[in-house]
Image (tube, rainbow, N blue to C red):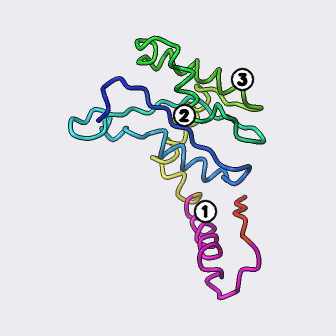
Amino acid sequence: FILPGTLMVQVLSTRGRLLPPEGLDHLMLSVGLAGAYGGQTSVTGTNIRTHLVGIFADKFEKAVSSPYELVKLLSTQSEEFRKNPDQVIPLLHQLMSNAHESSISTQECQTYLNSLLERFESNELRSQYEQAARKVGELFDLWFVGKTKAGKAATAQPELNIE
C-alpha cells in the first residue's frame, strides 16, 4: 500500500532521437492524464495523481534522472514540503534543468498536453495515429519477425523515421 501524500517520482527516458513526435504526443496523453479517469480519487484502486515537471534532454542520461537520486535529493526537505506538489515541482524542475542541456518548462508541458487533449477530443489526431500505426506496424514486423509484410527480409536493424 501507499500512504496518502506519498511522493512518487517517475522518470521516462529514451535513447537519443528514437521517439518521434507522434510517440511523444501519445506518451504525453497516456502519462500526462494518468488518473484523469477518476482513479486519483479511487477508494479501492491506486490513489495517484500525475503532475508533469518538464521535459529534459541531453546527449547522455544524467544520474540525477534516476528517481532514486531525485528522492534522495528531496529527502533533505521537510515532509510537508514533499507532500506539496506546488513546492516539489519547481525544485525538481530546477534540479533537472540544471543537469541537462535543454529543458521545457512545467507550464509549457501542461499547455502542450492541454492542446493535445483538445486535438484528441476533436478527432484531429486521428490521421496522425493512422499514419503512425502503419509505420509502427512495419517496425514491429522488421524488429520481431525479421521481414516486412511483403516478405522482404530485413537486412539491418530498422529505424523508425516518421516525418
Three-letter code, disc 2: Pro
Q: Indicate yes or no whether the magenta region holds residue 1.
A: no
Q: Indicate yes or no whether the magenta region holds residue 138.
A: yes
Q: Which region of the structure is painted magenta?
A: 129-156
Query: Label 2 vs label 3: CA separation?
Result: 16 Å
Report which residue position mark 3 lands on. Answer: 98
Left or right side of 37 for 22: right
Residue 71 vs residue 130, the one in the foreground = 71
Left or right side of 63 for 83: left
Three-letter code, disc 1: Ala
Q: In percent of the image, x 64 and y 31: which residue is there?
A: 64
What is the quadrant of residue 140 in the picture? bottom right
Position in image of residue 38 (x %, y %): 30, 38
Report which residue position mark 1 lands on. Answer: 132
Single out the mark in the foreground, 2 or 1: 2
Left or right side of 2 for 31: right
- Identify the mark nearer the N-term, 2 or 1: 2
- Identify the mark nearer the N-term, 3 or 1: 3
Position in image of residue 11 (x %, y %): 56, 38
Quadrant into which the C terminus falls: bottom right
Q: In percent of the image, x 54 and y 53: which residue is there?
A: 125
- Identify the mark nearer the N-term, 2 or 3: 2
